Image (tube, grey):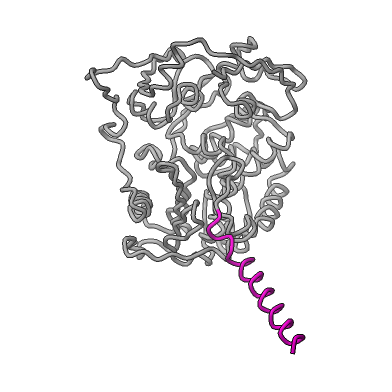
Amino acid sequence: MFSNFSSVLLSVILLCFQVQACYGSSNQVVKNQAGYATSSVQSDKSLAMVQSFSSSKIKIQDNVARAGLMYDLISGTILWEKNMHKAYPIASLTKMMVGLLVIEDIYAGKISWNTMIRVTPEATRAGGFMVALKSGSSISVESLLKAALISSGNDAAYLIAQYLGGTEQKFVNRMNRRADQLGMKSTRFSNATGMPAPNSRNDNHSSPLDLLILSKEMLKYNELLWIAGMSESSISQRGKTIKLKNHNRLVAVYDEVDGFKTGYTRNAKFCLVATANKNGRRIIAIALGLKSQDLRNQFVGNMLSQGYNSMGMGTLQPRTSYSMASAPKTKGSDSPKPIVHRVRTGDTLYGIAKTHDCSIAQLKSWNRLPGNVIKPGQQLKIYNKSPAIHASAAQPAVSNVIYYKVKSGDTLWRISQKYKGISVQKLMQINGLKRSSDLKAGDTLKIVIDVG
């Protein structure tokens, strides 16, 4: 009798462990390496066990889209989906995988942001939308990635693939291997640009669920968000400026939207993977196969708004009057005086916001900036009403000096992320660097951090 009881007890215990293994982590929230909250309900290789969620507050008119989904990163919850397991043509959403492999190579020390790549004749014949790269000119990895992710330049994506793979086809093989590693079971690539294949059955294709897996992996890298979140930018070629405009117009309309990529071909129709961060809560929205660009933008914007509204956070508000982050008012003063920051070479909105303890959205709203582009000499107004910050400004800060030996693959931005209280601009000033490209492996950087 005791033996039978022991067997039953052991069976119950094992069953409990099995249930916990499948579902027990669904409410655990962890931080990935980029600092974003994400659910540990599933590994990055599979989202098959993802929790489904139904809310009466979310009513998506999904007859206009072939497929899609909306995902809350913190809870690991799918808020809405349609045909999320089915594969469809994805056009230039392909370049998301290109971007991921580039950033992974940078972090692995194989290339750097400043690695110069010579434009090949083949790249200039990539076809489709191109940013007009000139054969024989040399372009940095950073510029090429901007051209590929912001303006969806096929010539830039092709050149990246050709350089990193030796040939485009070898790089495409690598793209497919990475997709397999991530558990993107419905995804296959035939090229690195998203251009239509000679046989439409071989067009690059993926499912909303696979694109969610890819998006989650990309969110591990702040640099990809920084680039994908630019509504406009520019790169230089042979001393001439190439202007870049983001095809994802939602990043220009909403402060909260900061990525990722659009796509269009006749077979794929209009596609979009967008991500937004509202008050620390990140949502990923995916829509495939819409009939027009405007419909795609309205559909995804409405999807994100409904997602946040269902959480009691209100909807996204278009950035038209800039009233959401207007100059703050304090007691005894109807018009507080702002701090004025003069933009210097190498400055970024991210670095300035970090230095002055505000958000990029506030910087853009206070200064009526339509995008993320700032120029040397430009004056930015910064309204800072934190009592703690004003108090610390009245006293000299205590500094901590660190000497850091530069490793292969390091960038000033990456180093600044390792040490709180230091910006790229400050690193350049302290070490007498005129350009970020002056940084070399083996150099010793002096890092001065204010700690009080």
Q: Residue at x 43, y 59 (%)?
A: 289
Q: Residue at x 34, y 48 (%)?
A: 313
Which quadrant would residue 136 be assigned to in this image? top right
Question: At which x and y percent is residue 381?
Answer: 36, 18
Q: Of residues 399 and 135, which is closer to you in this image?
A: 399
Q: Of residues 298 and 26, which is closer to you in this image?
A: 26
Overall secondary structure of the magenta section: helix
Question: At which x and y percent is residue 306?
Answer: 34, 54
Which quadrant would residue 452 be assigned to in this image? top right
Question: At which x and y percent is residue 188?
Answer: 62, 59
Question: At which x and y percent is residue 350?
Answer: 49, 28
Q: Residue at x 50, y 38 (%)?
A: 228
Q: Which residues are the magenta region? A: 1-28
Q: Of residues 346 and 395, which is closer to you in this image?
A: 395
- Quick one: quadrant of the N terminus? bottom right
Residue 61 left/right relative to 32: left
Q: Can residue 26 be found in the magenta stretch?
A: yes
Residue 102 left/right relative to 75: right
Q: Of residues 92 and 120, which is closer to you in this image?
A: 92
Q: Can residue 364 be found in the magenta stretch?
A: no
